[in-house]
Image (spheres, helix red, strand yellow):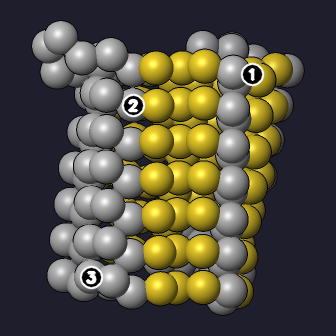
Amino acid sequence: LQQSKNNIVKRNTISSLDRFELGQKGDSVRLWYSFNNKIIDNITFNVRDMVVWYSADNIIKGNTGRDSRYSLHFMYSRYNLVEGNKYYNNAVGIFLMYSDGIIVRNNFIAHAAGPTGIGIGFKETSELTIEDNIVLYCASGLYIDMSPFQPDTINNFKNNLIGYNGIGI
């Protein structure tokens, strides 16, 4: 979805070919300068990433992502909602980079693979709400790098279960 708005991507199964290395596989869903879209109830596996770049006011809800690199990767995106997703057996569950005002709520993330596996990662992000998530069996449950980034802002973490990870936070 490039420079798109008000689309619904719902109840699809998306995968890539097994013959490629993880970094060479295709992305499952890519939002680029896209707004007010809904990505709902999709199943993705064996893909590189689901990416949301330079996009705002999107809803990513009820999806399942497995056996991929990044189940969900934000860059330079604001005011998106990530709710009720299940991400497991990925290198990274959710990674938020340079993306502010995002709500990550009621997600299940488990088994982020490898020594650098991350359940939820944060790089220079501000004004986040991270609540009621379950993050289990990852190398790092939460990885936080220079977040919050904007002066006088707060990232709120509440009621999350972070357990059985190599490093909790």
Crowd tier of the residue under label 1, counting other residues whose Cα lies within 10 Å: few below 14, some 14–19, many 20 or above: many
Task: Kindly identify which residue carries mark 2.
Answer: 128
Callout 1, which amino acid? Ile
Q: Position of residue 105 (x, y in %)?
A: 60, 41
Crowd tier of the residue under label 2, counting other residues whose Cα lies within 10 Å: few below 14, some 14–19, many 20 or above: many
Camera-nearest label, 1 or 2? 2
Residue 109 visible in the displayed image: yes
N-terminal of the pair, mark 3 or mark 2, is 3
Numbered tag placed on residue 5 in the rendering: 3
Residue at the image point whose x is 53% and y is 42% from the top? 104
Camera-nearest label, 3 or 1? 3
Q: Secondary structure at mark 1?
A: strand
Callout 3, which amino acid? Lys
Task: Kindly identify which residue carries mark 1.
Answer: 162
Q: Position of residue 115 (x, y in %)?
A: 67, 30
Residue at the image point whose x is 66% and y is 88% from the top? 12
N-terminal of the pair, mark 1 or mark 2, is 2
Q: Are marks 1 and 2 in contact (CB under 8 Å)?
A: no
Q: Position of residue 4 (x, y in %)?
A: 25, 84
Q: Considering only vertical position in the picture, is 142 above or below 56?
A: above
